[in-house]
C-alpha cells in the first residue's frame, strides 16, 4: 500500500504572495457572512484603482482621462 503524502497540509500552511503595498493584509468572513479586514476599504480601493485595469471602462471614449491620477491640493 502506498503512503499518502502531506502535500495538502504544506500548501495550507504557506502564506500567499502579496504586493508590498498590501503586506500584512488579512481578510476573513465570520459565521454571519460579514467580511472582516485589518485594512480600510478606502485603502484597498485606492490600491486597486492604481494597479488594476478596469476592462469594462476601457471601451469608454474618456477612459484615458478617467485613468489619470487626480492631483490633490496641498494646503
Image (cartoon, rainbow, N blue to C red):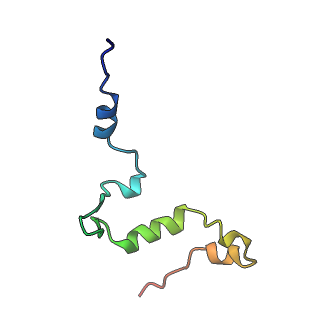
Near-viewer residue (16 or 42): 16
Q: Quadrant of residue 44?
A: bottom left
Compared to residue 54, the image places residue 8 above or below, namely above
**Residue beneath the point at 32% across and 58% down:** 25
Q: State the residue lying farthest toward the bottom.
A: 75
> Which quadrant: the N terminus?
top left
Near-viewer residue (16 or 23): 16
Badge count: 0
Near-viewer residue (35 or 66): 35
Compared to residue 36, the image places residue 75 above or below, namely below
Q: Position of residue 53 (x, y in %)?
A: 60, 63
**Residue beneath the point at 72% across and 79% down:** 62
Q: Position of residue 26 (x, y in %)?
A: 30, 57
Q: Position of residue 6 (x, y in %)?
A: 30, 26
> Which quadrant: the C terminus?
bottom left
**Residue beneath the point at 32% across and 22% down:** 5
Compared to residue 15, the image places residue 61 above or below, namely below
Q: State the residue lying farthest toward the top.
A: 1
Q: Position of residue 24 (x, y in %)?
A: 30, 54
Q: Quadrant of residue 63?
A: bottom right
**Residue beneath the point at 31% across and 39% down:** 12
Near-viewer residue (73 or 49): 49
Amino acid at each position: 500500500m502506498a503512503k499518502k503524502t502531506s502535500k495538502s497540509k504544506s500548501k495550507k500552511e504557506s502564506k500567499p504572495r502579496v504586493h508590498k503595498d498590501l503586506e500584512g493584509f488579512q481578510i476573513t468572513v465570520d459565521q454571519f457572512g460579514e467580511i472582516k479586514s485589518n485594512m480600510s476599504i478606502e485603502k484597498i480601493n485606492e490600491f486597486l484603482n492604481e494597479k488594476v485595469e478596469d476592462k469594462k471602462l476601457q471601451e469608454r471614449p474618456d477612459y484615458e482621462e478617467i485613468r489619470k491620477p487626480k492631483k490633490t491640493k496641498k494646503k
